[in-house]
Amino acid sequence: MTDARLRALLEDVPAAEDVPLAAHTTMGVGGAARLALFPRTEGQLCRVLRVLQEEGVPFALLGRGSNVLVSDKGVRVAVFTAEVNGLSRTPRGVRAGCGASLSALLRFALGQGLGGNAYLAGIPASVGGAVFMNAGARGRYIGTHVLRAEVWQGGKACVWDNERCRFTYKHTAFMESGAAVLAAEIAFFPADPAEERARIAAALAARGGLPKGRSMGCVFRNPPEGPAGALIEAAGLKGARCGGASVSARHANFILNEGGATAEDVRTLIGRVQGEVLRRTGIALQEEIRYIGEF
Ligand SMILES: Cc1cc2nc3c(=O)[nH]c(=O)nc-3n(C[C@H](O)[C@H](O)[C@H](O)COP(=O)(O)OP(=O)(O)OC[C@H]3O[C@@H](n4cnc5c(N)ncnc54)[C@H](O)[C@@H]3O)c2cc1C
């Protein structure tokens, strides 16, 4: 299928050609999307997914781009969910479109006199990306609070209950099934706005020690033996560099784009960290970040 035919099939969906993905990811590296699609509604998103899947066109689905490493070669098609961001109150919480940011979700809930998810404050994610990754902080994860997810799978929209999503530490059923999160209903509870605001401020303050600059957040999952950052630090890798990429001197599980890093620099540094930690400890660190495109 040619790009022109694809554009014709999806002519009402906002699109652009040769969009640099570095500008759409927190790491700021990687090549371009030959075609970028920006669906505005859940209906448009479903149609985009249907057409791409029926036509066998490979694509990358992106929320806020905060946990991805995009290949220097870029991708043929990228689908951005940011505009699919409706929020509405439900009897048990808030229903959020997949592209809504976690900060917008918390703000909306606060405005409704609801709280209970302040731990999500400061995570630079979309609701879809957070549900896909089971994002969380300080031992609490969004998966615990997902009442149901509206999902695109097998060419149709369906509803998954919490159990079907199979949330475990930084892992979900979405990763294996290739299913897309269209929207999710997140549990919230009546809360005093001033107290909830204070909880959000405390959660943000607790993140003050995280490295500043362009990163993907934690690169590696924590193995059962302990925090990945401590293992990397013990291996003497804080500050290790490859091209424009470096292991943060502040938090060794972060890799920073110091400016001008390529995806290949980052990939090489990840391999070096894995090799050195394995050699010293026998522990094989697994990436938490997701690779987009060809490496
Ligand atoms: C500074 C910084 C701090 C961070 N702190 C934390 C933290 O405290 N806790 C934490 O858990 N994470 C943290 N992260 C990582 C990141 O924010 C989370 O993993 C987040 O869940 C990614 O969401 P996203 O919308 O950016 O997804 P993206 O990075 O856009 O995508 C990540 C993956 O999700 C898939 N995806 C995105 N949207 C959908 C969808 N609608 N349906 C199906 N799949 C989808 C993508 O295809 C990709 O495979 C941090 C990142 C940064 C840069």
Image (cartoon, rainbow, N blue to C red):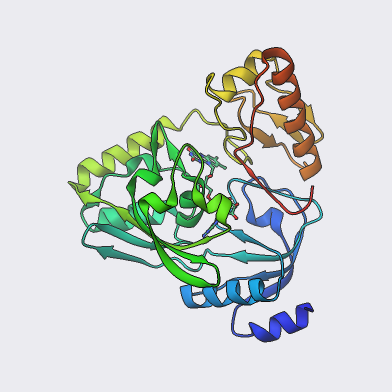
Whether residue 262 can be seen here: no
- Residue 290 versus residue 112: which sits nearer the camera? 290
Q: Residue at x 43, y 51 (%)?
A: 165
Q: Residue at x 38, y 62 (%)?
A: 96
Q: Is residue 55 left or right of residue 163?
A: right
Expressed as whole percent of the image width and height from the top left, the position of residue 32 reads: 76, 60
Q: How many numbered marks are there?
A: 0
- Residue 115 versus residue 151: which sits nearer the camera? 151
- Quadrant hosting residue 235: top right
Q: Is residue 272 left or right of residue 209?
A: right
- Quadrant hosting residue 9: bottom right
Expressed as whole percent of the image width and height from the top left, the position of residue 216 reads: 61, 41
Q: Is residue 149 left or right of residue 45?
A: left
Expressed as whole percent of the image width and height from the top left, the position of residue 243 reads: 82, 34
Q: Where is 269 relative to 149, above or below?
A: above
Q: Where is 3 relative to 62, above or below?
A: below
Image quadrant holding the N terminus, namely bottom right
Whether residue 2 can be seen here: yes
Expressed as whole percent of the image width and height from the top left, the position of residue 279 reads: 74, 16
Q: Where is 259 relative to 103, above or below?
A: above
- Quadrant hosting residue 87: bottom left
Q: Is residue 59 left or right of residue 86?
A: right
- Residue 103 versus residue 152: which sits nearer the camera? 152
